[in-house]
Every structure is written in C-alpha cells, then in structure tokens.
Image (cartoon, rainbow, N blue to C red):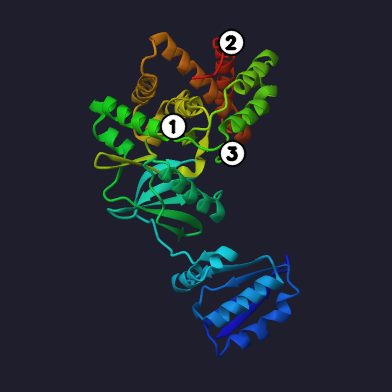
C-alpha cells in the first residue's frame, strides 16, 4: 500500500490510496492520514489505483467520514466500487466510479441536441457526448429521470454506463441496430405521415404518465420565468399579456419530455425508445407542442437551410411534419381549432426563442422577427390551454 496526500486551496484533503488495503496494513493507513484529516474541511479518497480493500480498510474510511462529514470516495475502480456498493458504503457517502474512456473519432453522428451530440459506437451501442455545461451530477440525474420514465411505462433508453470522451462525459446506450426516427424519415420521405403517426403515438405515451406534484420540474414555472424576462423587451400591452396568458395555463402533473423531436426517438425495428431525458419535466402538453414548433419550424424561419443542417430534412417537410403532428395529436378537433392550437404553439415558441436569442445576442434579426410575430399573435388567442 502507498498513500499520497494533497491539500487543495479550499482545504479539501485528497488522499490517493494505491495497491491493496487489508488487515495487515489498515493500521498504517489510519495512522498515515488521520492527523491530516482532522484539519481538513472536506476529504476526497482517490481509489483510481486501489486494487482491493478489506473490511479493516473500510472501517478506516468510516472513521474518516465520522471525523469529516464531507467525505467522498472518487474514481473507484469497478472492483472496488462493487465492494463499496455491496457493503452499503455507497448509501452512507458519495462513491463515484472511475469512468472508462472511449473515443468517437470516425464515429457516425446520429443526433445533436442542446446539451450534446450522439454518436454510433458500434452496431449495438451509441454514446451521447455532453457539452461542457453538463456536470457528472446532472448526467447521473438524467439517468435517474430515465429510470423514472421507464417505471411509468415510457419506452425509455436507460444509459448502461457513463464514460469519459476526451475531456467530456458521455452516456452509453445499448440499442441493437437502432436508427433515429429522423434517419428513418430521410430514407423514406414519401411515407412521412407514417412516421408522424409513430412520433405522436410515443408522445402520447409520455404525456399519459402522471406524476406527483413536485416530482419533476414544473415547466409552467420555467416558461413563466422566460415570459417575465422578455416582458421589458416587448410593447407594454404585449408583454403584460404574454405573462398573463402563461399564468393562466392550468396546473398539470403529466410528464413532458421537454425537447421532443425525431432525433430523440430511437427505433429498433418498429419499437421506439426515447433518449435525451435531461429535459424531462411536467406540465400541460401545450408546452411540449410549443417547443416542437421551435425545433421543426421556429429555428428555420429566417434560414430554411437550418432544418437541413440539423435534421437533414427540407424545411417544407418539417413544416408538414409539425402540422400533421398537431392534427393527429388533436384528433377530433376542427380545422379552425387546430389552427388556433398552432398559434398557441407559435406564441410559446417565440417566448422561448426571444429569451434564448436575447441571452446569446448572436442573431438580432431573428430576435426582432420573433418579437414582431408574438405581437401579432398574442391578441388572437384567449388563452394558451390545449
């Protein structure tokens, strides 16, 4: 056994344990670290090169935890991680596993979203590589959200592993010969309505899942926050009405995906599986439909080539896909009622995009267009309910 110690600027003590800790050397482990432990504000026990730890070694870690409440085990090898899990240590303190490293060099890109890019690693595995904005805690949370959706009957692809891809994190999914719904459409554009139906069927399964109040992020609160942020940018009567209409959307505890589009639906044969669950939330389905308008139409309103660049599908086909989705989703509605739903979707789209484009300041012409559109639409609807 070897021990390396390092005190960080924030008074966190990093203890790296190398080799094996057993009954013979556990006393040396304890005597070698405790005098430093009691002076630290936090302790990280680096187990990246720890091959084995016995119950005697675990008792030393328990003493460290009792001395410093903010103690965690990091970079545990698969073998030692299993020991921590089986003995219940992972329930008493945070224990993180050492992540295996994979390369996506030369891999096909099959999806791209706000928080990451999806690559095909092999015939039966894909990896979602997250942007720098995604921390390990948030990625672990996404996996828990996927499990929650799965338990509620949503056909969800649950990550089998979390990996490192260069300096970024990634989630690995085992999906045998899977294609995105987007790929299916590109290869069979003449039957696009068939894929609209498949997409809406999956969407309705998601929206049928009912949650307890507070179980997921409330989408209404988030959108209301956007509405209040953009209110000063709009004419006074328009801004106040935007906020009022969002406030008037009734509370709803049904599940929403939050970023639902044809690149986030994987198909294995005729069986769909949903990915990209970090945006999972709850609320009225009108929010989901509004964000779908953003994906399929809103971002392409100035430059129709944007749809081709993101989806690989012509703008007119994407507009048709969205309109047909609303028609099928709102089965039984009259044409005028469907037109009204689309207006509501557009309003919610523009609330989202005005807020987003104002923050990034990169497309002022789009920002002005969205402001003009929302001003024209906002008094054409009485409410934003579905």
Are the residues tagged 3 and 2 within 8 Å (C-beta)?
Answer: no
**Quadrant of the image occupied by residue 24:** bottom right
Whether residue 135 is visible, yes or no, is no
For residue 207, the mark is: 1
**Quadrant of the image occupied by residue 262:** top left
Mark 1 or 3, nearer chain start: 1
The reply, left or right, for residue 326 in relation to residue 92 is left
**Residue at left offset 41%, top offset 25%:** 304
Depicted 354 relative to depicted 104: above or below:
above
Tell me the residue that label 3 is attached to. 214
* Quadrant of the rendering where the N terminus is positioned: bottom right
Whether residue 297 is visible, yes or no, is yes
Residue 166: where, in percent of width, then height?
Answer: 47, 60
Residue 288: where, in percent of width, then height?
Answer: 48, 29
Are the residues tagged 1 and 3 within 8 Å (C-beta)?
Answer: no
Mark 3 or 2, nearer chain start: 3
Q: Which secondary structure, mark 1?
A: helix
Tell me the residue that label 2 is attached to. 379
Depicted 94 relative to depicted 274: above or below:
below
């Amino acid at each position: 056994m070897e021990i390396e110690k390092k005190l960080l600027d924030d008074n966190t003590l990093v203890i790296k344990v190398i080799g094996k800790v057993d009954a013979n050397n556990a006393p040396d482990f304890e005597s070698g670290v405790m005098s430093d432990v009691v002076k630290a504000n936090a302790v990280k026990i680096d187990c990246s090169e720890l091959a084995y730890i016995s119950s005697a070694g675990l008792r030393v870690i328990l003493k460290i935890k009792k001395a410093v409440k903010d103690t965690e085990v990091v970079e545990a090898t698969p073998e030692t991680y299993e020991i921590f899990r089986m003995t219940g240590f992972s329930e008493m303190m945070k224990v993180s596993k050492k992540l295996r490293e994979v390369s996506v060099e030369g891999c096909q890109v099959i999806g791209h979203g706000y928080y990451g890019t999806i690559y095909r690693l092999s015939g039966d595995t894909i990896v979602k590589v997250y942007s720098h904005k995604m921390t390990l805690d948030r990625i672990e949370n996404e996996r828990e959200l996927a499990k929650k959706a799965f338990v509620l009957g949503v056909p969800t692809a649950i990550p089998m592993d979390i990996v490192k891809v260069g300096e970024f994190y990634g989630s690995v999914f085992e999906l045998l010969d899977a294609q995105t719904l987007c790929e299916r459409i590109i290869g069979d554009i003449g039957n696009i309505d068939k894929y609209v139906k498949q997409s809406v069927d999956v969407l309705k399964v998601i929206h049928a899942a009912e949650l307890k109040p507070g179980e997921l992020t409330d989408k209404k609160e988030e959108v209301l926050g956007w509405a209040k942020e953009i209110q000063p940018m709009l004419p006074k009567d328009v801004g106040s009405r935007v906020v009022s209409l969002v406030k008037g959307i009734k509370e709803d505890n049904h599940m929403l995906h939050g970023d639902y589009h044809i690149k986030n639906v994987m198909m294995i044969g005729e069986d769909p599986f949903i990915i990209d669950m970090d945006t999972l939330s709850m609320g009225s389905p009108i929010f989901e439909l509004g964000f779908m308008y953003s994906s399929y139409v809103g971002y392409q309103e100035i430059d129709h080539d944007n749809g081709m660049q993101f989806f690989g599908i012509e703008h007119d086909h994407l507009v048709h896909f969205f309109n047909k989705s609303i028609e099928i989703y709102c089965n039984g509605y009259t044409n005028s009622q469907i037109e009204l739903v689309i207006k509501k979707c557009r309003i919610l789209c523009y609330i989202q995009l005005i807020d987003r484009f104002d923050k990034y300041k990169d497309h002022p012409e789009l920002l002005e267009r969205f402001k003009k559109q929302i001003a024209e639409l906002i008094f054409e609807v009485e409410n934003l309910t579905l």
